[in-house]
Amino acid sequence: MIEIIAVKLRKDVSALCNLSQRIRDNTLVDVIMTMYENNFTLEQIAVATKKSVEEVSAIIKKREPVLA
């Protein structure tokens, strides 16, 4: 019985950790996009977010609207 509870608890904790990580990731993307929209350079964004210029560029490309 205790083992079943421990397994369930581990799964719940894992789910919460995954949710927390997604929230952090989404917040970072929002910060990157806000900086980009306010004309920060990719280098400035990279320094401020501790990401590489390539990572920042990839995030921006994924989030920019496609003009039809």
Image (tube, rainbow, N blue to C red):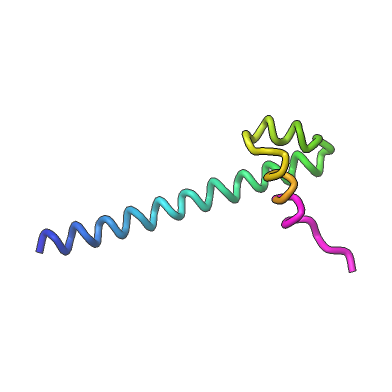
Residue 62 spot, x, y in % from top left: 72, 57
Quarter of the image for the N terminus: give it: bottom left
Residue 39 spot, x, y in % from top left: 84, 38
* Residue 45, quarter of picture: top right
Vertical placement of residue 45 versus 11, above or below: above
Q: Which residues are magenta?
A: 59-68
- Residue visible at 32% across and 58% down? 12
Q: How many discs mark residues in the rendered view?
A: 0
Vertical placement of residue 31 versus 2, above or below: above
Residue situated furthest left in the rendering: 1
* Residue 50, quarter of picture: top right
- Residue visible at 11% across and 59% down? 2
* Residue 55, quarter of picture: top right
Camera-side residue of 46 and 24: 46
Residue 41 spot, x, y in % from top left: 81, 35
Residue 51 spot, x, y in % from top left: 64, 38
Quarter of the image for the C terminus: give it: bottom right
